Structure formats: C-alpha cells, structure tokens
Amino acid sequence: MTTEALSERELDDYRSGADRFLAELDEEYYLHYAGHKPDFELRAIYERHADLTDLETVKRVGSAVDGRENLELFRFGCEGYLGELTRGHAERIAELEATLEVAHNGETIGYRMLKPTIANEPDRAVRARLESMRNELTESQLNPIHVDAVETTQRAVPELGAPNYHLLYRDRLALELDGLVAQCRAFLDQTDRLYEDSMDRTLREQVGVGLAEAERYDLARFFRGSSWDAAFPADRMLPALRGTLANLGIDLDAQANVHLDVEARPTKTPRAFCAPIEVPGKVMLVIQPMGGPDDWRALFHEAGHTEHFAFTSPDLKMEEKRLGDNAVTEGWAMLLEHLVGDQSWLTRMLSFPKPQEFAAEAAVNLLFFVRRYSAKLLYEVEFHAAADPTTMRSRYVELLGDAVKIEPSPTDYLADIDSGYYCTSYLRSWAFEAQLSTFLREEYGSDWFTRREAGSLLKELWELGQQPTADELLKDVTGAPIELDAVADKIRTALPSFA
C-alpha cells in the first residue's frame, strides 16, 4: 500500500518543527561540550518533537520526495527516526566520555583528555601506556553500547524502505557513493609511494621514528606538531583569525550573530567546534586555546563553518540553511583551515620563519587524512552492508592500516564511524577546497586572503547556505566537477622532492 504524501502545508509545518528541533539539539550540544552543563540531555528534546521522528510521518515525507524536492527533509526524517532509537546510547556514551577517568602519575585524566595528553607526551613509553588505557576503556565501557546502537539501527532500517543502511543511503537517499568509492581507490593507488616516502621522512623529523616503526600513539604526537609551537602561540590564535577575516572585509567582533566562547572550563572539549543554534541568527564558535599548529587548524576550520552559517541568507528554506550537502560547509571550513599551512599566509600574517618546510609538512598531514578517509569510506560501505557488524573488526584494521601503513586500534572499529556516511562530506570537501583555492589564487593572486574582492565573493557564496551541492557550487564558480585528483595535485606541488 502506498503511503499518502504530506501536503504542502504539512511539509511547511514539518520544516518549522525540524528547524526548532535542530536548534535545540545544537544548543544542547553547545552547552554540554563547551562545559556549561555536565549532562548531555537529549530525551526532552526528542520528546518535544516526537512527531518529526514518528515512523509513519517519516514515510509520508518519503512519499513526497520528487527528485531532489523534499529529499533533504526525508533524509532528516530518516536520521531523526534512527537517532531517536539510539538517543539513549548517545547520551550514555557522552556521559561516560565526560566522567571516565584513568590514574596517571598520581593524578587522574579524563577520557576526553587522553588524546590531547598523548599528543603532548614526548615519552613513547608513556604514550603507549596512555593509549592502552584509552583502548581498554573504549573496549570495556563504550563498545558494548556502540554494538547495541548499531544492531538497533540495523533492525530499524527496513522500516524506511531499504534492506540495510548502505542501500538506504545509496538508493533511497540518493547519496552518490559508487563514483566516490572509485575515486578513493584510485587516490590510494596513485599516492601510495608518495605517502610512504614523505610520511616516513616527516615522522623521523618530528617524532624520531620511521613509518615502519611508528605506532598509533606516535601519530597523535606527530599531528600535535610540537616542534612548531613557538610559531603558533595560544595568545595569537584569535588575533590571527580576526586579522585574516578583516583583510577579507569581515569584522569578527562586529558580527552580532557570532558568539565566541573562549573561556577555559574543566569539562570543555579541547577541540574547537561550531554550533549553529540559529542560522544565521546565533552561531557559536567554541575554542579552548592551547596553542600549537593543530589547535590553530581546528580554530580556523570551525571559523569557516561559523562564517558560512553566519552569512547564510535568512530567506532560504530550512533545509537549505541547516541540511543539504555537508561537503559545502566542510569545504568552507577546509578553505580557512588550510590557510594555516599556506606559504603565502604564513609569511604575510605570521612572519613565519620556515614557511616552505611547514607547508610541506601540512601537505603530508593532508595526504594522511585523505588516504585515511578514503579507506574509511571503503570500510564503512562494507560495514553498513554486513549482516553482523562485530565481524568487521579485522577488516577495519586491514583497510585503514593498508592506507596509512600504521595499524589502528581494533577497539575503534565502531567509534570511528560517523553516521550518515559523513566521511563522504570530508572527502569531497578536500577536493572542493583544492579546486576552489586554486581558482582564488589564479583570480586574485597568491595572497587572495588579503583581497576584499575575494572576501566579497566568499560572502556571496556563503549566502547560498546549503542550497547548492558542493559539485554545483564548484562548477558554477570554476566550471569543473569535484575530483580527488585535485587534492593529489595540490600535495605534489607542496612536495616537489617526493613527487
């Protein structure tokens, strides 16, 4: 029997409800992860908006899909329905992450602070011990909840009209996966030698071990980039961001809809994040400045999200402001983040001592992450099609280990999966950034980030919110489709001695 589609009036009511639901979720996320409240309380929010995630309502939204029309609303409904079923799991995981602790050197370290502690620890033996503690807590405390959440999702997906999670996204939600999977395989093949050579040398320089000897805990230390700390002090992070935006014609402190949360709190997540509570009316940029290049990259990344949402036109439909193709907002985030590794920006904004060396290291970092996420997509495609997810532990180690040549912890085979194939947004955003930044350099010069004309173009594009896909946006500006090959070209340009 065909489910009756929602009427236009009902769809408008559904949009309004979804807008409030997402605003409340983002506010709760902000309050908890910024350290303002200890509990991550989703139940009341889901209960207030239970009609949005009701199965029959979601099916009726699905019946209203016509091509791309209402497709984003249906995706929202599907994810809301599955999210409601696993809401308790998310709350419990957040609670454990905020309260679990380990004993170390006569003190206690919270679970969320283990990764930054490992990254800041120069002693390999200590890093290994901390990593072992993290893995044990993940396996014993968190993974049973992750497994139950996955199994709950698997049982529920057929109600949405697909036999498994993979086919739900590929077929019913029209997520283009096959072509991107092929691009990922090609990227891994084409950059294998480049990665092995460049990563080996850079690891030796920064951590003191080669690629063959490196362990997962060495990667945390490597990406911390501590040898560059003097060039990236905590007290210059926000001034550098303010200065960069000012050169583009944006006064960060005059943006009434942008709120900076920079206070240090014990339970505040150490990673910068953006919470678009109202789009574009109230966008939170949260940072706990610690210094170091990784911290700077995180701030500039989240600032890209912040400016995108802050300039989004209020006249767009809800789904064009809050939903849509997340490769768009991730692309804007990558555009600002990658300035931190840009030779011209380093020289112009920071009077950087060795811009070419740091830019080369940044290119190696990028190569690592694109290879890792390429393997992550291959893994997630298999994972979401598997009848029994607990059998995928060894496959996770195999695929990701082959890509980055360092075995991941098998305990992360569940936690290392973002819902909704979000890894595709990151992969496409890296290509979007590589192609768009090339266009900006050709159009405005290597110092495009100092040009008001470039800033005007960015603001015009940000106004479009999430209305176009990343492919449509890039093609409109540059005439080219999104291609991972562009990322490989960008990396080879920065690593001429290895290319």
Image (cartoon, rainbow, N blue to C red):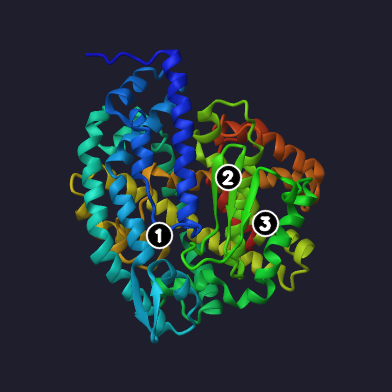
- Relative to 164, 78 lies left or right: right
Question: What residue is disc 2 on?
Answer: 331
Tell me: 134 left or right of 149.
Answer: right
Kind of residue at badge 1: Ala
- Image height of 146 relative to 4, above or below: below
Rendered location of residue 436, percent (x, y):
65, 43
In the rendered image, residue 476, in percent from the top left (x then y), is placed at 65, 30
Amino acid at pointer 2: Gly
Residue at (50, 82) in percent of width and height? 208
**Residue at figure coordinates x 53%, y 74% from the top left:** 201
Name the quadrant containing residue 412. bottom left
Q: Residue at x 63, y 66 (%)?
A: 360
Q: Residues within 10 Å of mark 2 (few under 14, many from 20)?
A: many
Q: Which mark is residue 339?
A: 3
Is residue 328 shown to the viewer in this render?
yes
Residue 243 picture quarter: bottom right
**Horizontal relation, residue 288 to residue 381: left or right:** right
Amino acid under disc 3 = Leu
Mark 2 vs mark 1, CA separation in Å: 23 Å
In this view, the mark in front (2 or 1): 2
Disc on res. 403: 1
